[in-house]
Image (cartoon, rainbow, N blue to C red):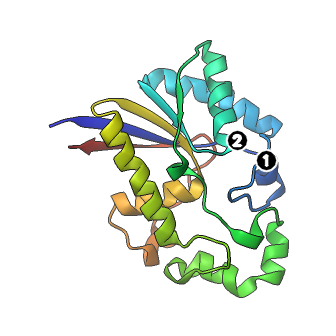
Amino acid sequence: MTTTEIYLFRHAQTLWNEQKRFQGQKNSDLSDLGILQARKMAEKIKLLKPDVFITSGLKRTKETLQYALEEMGEERNIYEFIEFNEAAFGNWEGMLLEDVLKEFNVEYDTHKERPHLFKLQGAETYFEIQNRSIKGIKKILGKFPGKKVAVVTHGMVILCLTGYLRNIPIKRIREKVSIPNNTDFLKTCWYH
């Protein structure tokens, strides 16, 4: 049996996080605090000693890892797996949270309180995010068996994967799982 360790890091804070805007799959630069968080993430990476580094296809994950590796004084091969991209949020992308609450009150309430029923034009459902993320995990297991893998990804991806790992139905995921803070991580071990 082979054990593959996967560390799921949330990217560092962005300007849109700071402004309380929905990002989804749109890009926003790291904030000043985000750059500091990314540099401090180097300490965690040094302790974990990953063999492989993966980011989503979005700029904020790549920048987070680049700052961390720069702080460590290391150059490493970095793989990009779009399966770990943040959820698509349709028309909400780029909108301030307060405007979403005004214009999409019912949909936002469903997103937070009844995630299993969440649907929005141009947005992914929680089920779609979870299924896509699981494909990313399977890809890692096939490509890097027995390795320690650091994945810099997004809050919704980690939320949905945590629910899957803990066997929590999507219906209960928001009440049972919290999205990690920027640059926090979740360790998972896969036996295959």
Q: Residue at x 22, y 43 (%)?
A: 191
Residue located beneath label 1 in the image? 28
Mark 2 Cα-neighbour bin, 10 Å: few <14, some 14–19, many ≥20: some
Extreme residue toward the top, this view: 73
Q: Residue at x 50, y 59 (%)?
A: 159
Q: Which mark is residue 4?
A: none
Extreme residue toward the bottom, this view: 106
39 is higher (above) or lower (below) than 105: above
Q: Are marks 1 and 2 in contact (CB under 8 Å)?
A: yes
Residue type (three-letter) at the residue carrying disc 1: Ser
Viewer can see residue 12: no
From the viewer's side, name the closer residue of 105 and 76: 76
Q: Residue at x 51, y 70 (%)?
A: 126
Residue located beneath label 2 in the image? 59
Viewer can see residue 98: yes
For this view, does 110 lie left or right of residue 45? right
Secondary structure under tag 1 reads: loop
